[in-house]
């Protein structure tokens, strides 16, 4: 039962980030018309930088794919963690209407990091 729940949660998590990354390239999900002014400025700044959104999109797609598979899930959780911190900050400070979904995704990420903590010991103990 636990393994089925982990698989479903990981599959959905991975698909959310694959979708998010692909949307950064193809813009098939339009931005809401009622975005707060701060968010509009933030998005404009990200677009102005030029290289940041494609980098985030590539990491989201790769980590989303890796998150689906058990053998690579620990690596994916580490890869996506900095992006999740940014997502949480944005939704906490500027767009609280998305905070529930962002929090659920963040908790899944933390849970996977915790479940795979033994795999990270070699990075910390040396």
Image (cartoon, helix red, strand yellow):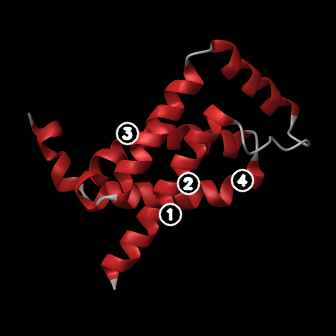
Q: Is residue 45 above or below residue 83?
A: above
Q: Return the residue at label 1.
A: 12
* Residue beneath the point at 66% across and 35% down: 26
Please identify the residue farthest to the top as the structure is shown.
49
Q: Nearer the viewer, mark 4 or mark 1?
A: 1
Please identify the residue farthest to the bottom as the structure is shown.
1
Q: Judge by depth and name the residue closer to the eye, 24 or 92.
A: 24
Q: Return the residue at label 4.
A: 98
Q: Nearer the viewer, mark 2 or mark 4?
A: 2
* Residue beneath the point at 37% across and 53% down: 67
Residue 36 location, quadrant:
top right
- Secondary structure beneath dot 4 equals helix
Q: Return the residue at label 2.
A: 16
Q: Quadrant of the C terminus?
A: top left
Q: Earlier in the sequence, mark 4 or mark 1?
A: 1
> In x, y percent, where is residue 69?
31, 58
Q: Distance of mark 2 from mark 3, alpha carbons? A: 15 Å
Q: Return the residue at label 3.
A: 79
Residue 30 location, quadrant:
top right
Q: Are marks 1 and 2 in contact (CB under 8 Å)?
A: yes
Is residue 18 found left or right of 68 in the rendered image?
right
Q: Nearer the viewer, mark 3 or mark 1?
A: 1
């Amino acid at each position: 039962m636990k393994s089925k729940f982990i698989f479903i949660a990981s599959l959905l998590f991975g698909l959310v980030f694959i979708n998010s990354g692909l949307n950064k390239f193809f813009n098939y999900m339009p931005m809401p018309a009622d975005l707060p002014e701060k968010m509009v400025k933030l998005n404009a700044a990200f677009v102005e930088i030029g290289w940041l959104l494609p980098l985030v999109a590539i990491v989201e797609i790769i980590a989303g794919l890796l998150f689906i598979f058990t053998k690579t899930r620990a690596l994916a959780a580490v890869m996506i963690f900095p992006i999740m911190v940014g997502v949480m900050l944005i939704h906490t400070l500027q767009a609280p209407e998305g905070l529930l979904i962002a929090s659920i995704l963040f908790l899944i990420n933390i849970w996977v990091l915790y479940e795979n903590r033994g795999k990270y010991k070699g990075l910390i103990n040396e």
